[in-house]
Amino acid sequence: MLHALLGHPDLAGIPLLLLANKQDAQGALSPHEVEARFGLQQVLETSQPRQVFGTAALTGERIEESIHWLVEASNSRDIAERQPRGSREVAER
């Protein structure tokens, strides 16, 4: 279901933030392991910004950093969409 959703043309270029929570718990999967389990490396095109953050919600570890990344990635996308087509292609190179 996730792969079908991420492959939808309307979501091309939309930032994807995945939180690998419970990093404070013994046996928690690392962010890299979570990304591999979801198969995100094979599914997502390289132009789609994505980030997997290891978090611990109880302590707030990396929560603020992950939200900051999402805001920045969204703002970058908004700026790219507002550029005229010719300048957008140059900005993506």
Image (tube, rainbow, N blue to C red):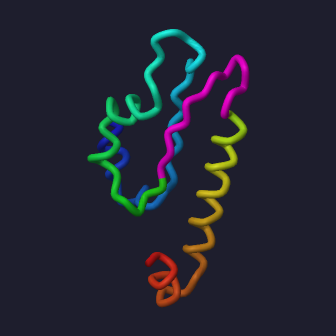
Q: Is residue 51 above or below residue 38?
A: below
The x, y position of residue 8, in whole percent, is 34, 53
Quarter of the image holding residue 80? Answer: bottom right
The x, y position of residue 45, in whole percent, is 34, 57
The x, y position of residue 3, in whole percent, is 31, 42
Q: Is residue 18 above or below residue 24?
A: below
* Pick the front one: 32 or 81: 32
Residue 46 falls within the magenta-colored stretch:
no
Q: Main secondary structure of the magenta part?
A: loop
The x, y position of residue 58, in whole percent, is 70, 17
Query: Which residue is at 58% across, 82% downward?
Result: 83
* Pick the front one: 1 or 76: 76
* Pick the front one: 87 or 2: 87
Q: Find the magenta span and give its range.
A: 50-62
Query: Which residue is at 50% across, 45% downward?
Result: 51
Q: Is residue 28 above or below residue 31?
A: above
Which quarter of the rendered picture does the C terminus lie within? bottom left
* Number of marks: 0
Quarter of the image holding residue 36? Answer: top left
Q: Residue furthest left?
A: 42
Which quarter of the rendered picture does the N terminus lie within? top left
Query: Which residue is at 51% across, 53% downward?
Result: 15
* Pick the front one: 72 or 54: 54
Please indicate whether residue 26 sits to the left or right of residue 73 in the image.
left
Quarter of the image holding residue 81? Answer: bottom right
Please indicate whether residue 76 sits to the left or right of residue 41 in the image.
right
Q: Residue furthest bottom?
A: 86
Query: Which residue is at 67% across, 53% downward?
Result: 71
Q: Is residue 8 above or below residue 28?
A: below
